[in-house]
Image: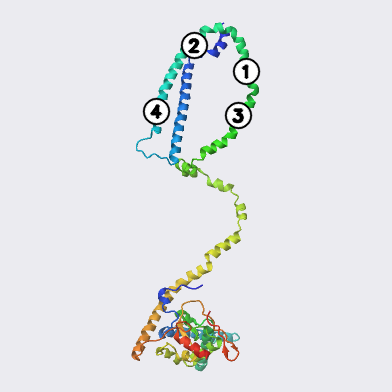
Amino acid sequence: MTEVLPARARAFQGLRSGPVSRTIAGVIDVGVVALATAGVVLGWSLIESLGDRAFELSIPGPLGAFLLGESLLTIYLWFGWATTGRTIGKQVMGLRLVNYRGELMRPGGALLRALACVIFPLGLLWSLVSSHNRSLQDVVLRTSVIYDWNAQLPARSARRARVGAGEVTREGRA
Amino acid sequence: MEEDLAPSVELVVVPRDSRGVARQAVRVATGTALAAAALTVNALQRSRSLSGAIQRHAEPSLLALVPGAVLGWSLGGARRVSALASGALDTVGPVMRAVAPAVRPLEGPFRRTLADSDRRWRAVEAESLNAAAAFVRELEPQIVRAALEPLDLTTLVNESVDLDEIAGKLDVDRVAQRLDMDAIIKKLDLPKLVEEVLAEIDVADLIRQSTGTLTGDAIDEVRYVSVDADRVVARLVDRVIRRRRRHLDAPGEPESAAASVENELELS
């Protein structure tokens, strides 16, 4: 089922999104992951206290909490981008991450980008000045964050097989 | 003498009060004939106008005047005939009474002849009646059909029957009681019907739409605002760094120059 979008929204569907939308989406995502991290800590404490009499919150050290949060964020971004091209934040803001052909990323590419974002988040700020609204991660991995309010998924990047001497067959968007 | 005479005289002499009956009989016969004549003329005229030969005169056609005229003449005639008939009875009555003793010897043979005729009639009466009944039965449907054919019964009922009143008198509960609902339900293929209805409605889509719009409108507003903010911020930055415009074409789209360049890069 294809959704019918208002004409006002149709005008910018598929264009690369700007810094404000992306920042809001990022803040939402970080908030979600922060909540998840807190949940993990709480859950872990509960499991640990099962044997003991008294419940005690086992708070990890600052480094431990940071590493836990980063790991969860990586998994979260990876999962979102590899499955639907959007995390919860992007879903709320109507954004989608696509590869250079406008298709969903493959898991490997999605993991690479997730790691790049978590390790060097400052690179995302490049979208402010980029003439194509792209972050450094986008430039390096040739990805784009586009406005896409449709629930319908774009085509998934087809696995390319080399046929003959370096010939590439491609199955692009239908 | 008088007792002897009475039955035979009865055959030929009409009693005095019979004059009223005779007058009435003449009236009825004339009336019937006239009504038939009027009806025929009317029918003839209607069939003429129905067949397209409608006369568009302001004055009534000559033919339309005929029934009324005939009726007028005939009423006069009938009055005269009934007067004549009662006069004739007045004249014939005394004559017959005077003649009666003279014709008395003839009474015996006359009576016998009558009895014979009567017997013969009774012998064939049943047969004749049956034949007549059969004939009428045979004719009846044809007559009824011929009479009903030109009638628009629906219009006739609509115009002259108060259906609402009849419907008001109808005891729907009793009708409903007599209905065998189970048999009707058994005849219906309910699962198939329900399936068809569900397919027609697309319930899943309906639920998706109704729940989606509740939150969708608010989220859409946030998205619109952020898209506008994107433009404003981008324009601001572009002005600061003195850039003319940004290229926001989506990759993978036919009109996307960036995508085609990248595709070529990938292929080479």
Q: Chain of mark 1?
A: B
Q: Which quadrant, please, contains the N terminus of chain B?
A: top right
Callout 3 and callout 1 share a chain: yes
Q: Amino acid at mark 1?
A: Ser
Mark earlier in primary sequence (3, 1): 1
The numbered mark at residue B132 is 3
Q: Position of residue A144 (x, y in %)?
A: 47, 86
Name the element at disc 2. helix
Q: Which residue is label 2 attached to?
A: B93
**Total count of labels:** 4
Work out whether residue A30 or residue B117 is closer to the camera in this orientation and state it: B117
Question: How far apart are labels 4 and 3 at the CA level?
Answer: 37 Å
Question: How far apart are labels 3 and 1 at the CA level?
Answer: 20 Å
Q: Amino acid at mark 2?
A: Gly
Q: Chain of mark 4?
A: B
Q: Which residue is label 4 attached to?
A: B69
Q: Amino acid at mark 3?
A: Ala
Residue at the right extreme, as displayed:
B123
